[in-house]
Amino acid sequence: MQKKIYVDGMFDPDTAAKVGAAVSAVAGVTNCNANPDKSQVLVDFDESVGGIEDAINNAISSTGIAVLG
């Protein structure tokens, strides 16, 4: 499954790299592209993994970035 997540506070490539690394570390995530220009994170993941969407949102939040939806 692919999901586009809008975020607030990701303004530069360094921050986007941190978000991408955090999300990629979540079990079940197969691809992640954090785009600071669009303030969004595009994530491909295995939806059969229980609680993965919450884990992705928590990974983003752990970098100090606010998840908008």
Image (cartoon, helix red, strand yellow):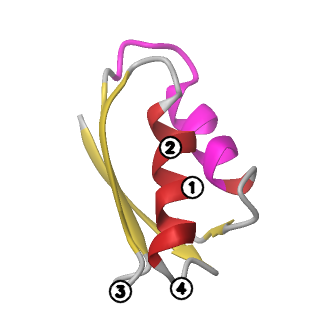
Residue located at (62% from left, 36% from top): 54
**Amino acid at the residue labelled 4:** Phe
**Amino acid at the residue labelled 1:** Lys
**Amino acid at the residue labelled 2:** Ala
Residue beneath disc 2: 21
Sequence order check: which comes first, mark 2 or mark 4? 4
Of tags 2 and 3, the one toward the viewer is 2
Mark 4 falls on what kind of element? Answer: loop
**Amino acid at the residue labelled 3:** Asp
Residue beneath disc 3: 37
Residue 7, x across and y down, in percent: 54, 72
Sequence order check: which comes first, mark 2 or mark 3? 2
Residue 56, x across and y down, in percent: 55, 40
Segment colored magenta: 47-60
Q: Quadrant of residue 67?
A: bottom right
Residue located at (53% from left, 85% from top): 11
> In the displayed structure, would residue 25 be above or below residue 28?
below
Disc on res. 18: 1
Disc on res. 27: none
How crowded pointer 4 is (Cα within 10 Å; few <14, some 14-19, many 20+) is rated as some
Sequence order check: which comes first, mark 4 or mark 3? 4
Residue 27, x across and y down, in percent: 49, 17
Sequence order check: which comes first, mark 4 or mark 1? 4
Give the Cα separation between the discs numbered 4 and 1.
12 Å
Give the Cα separation between the discs numbered 2 and 1.
5 Å
Q: Quadrant of residue 31?
A: top left
> In the displayed structure, would residue 59 be above or below residue 7?
above
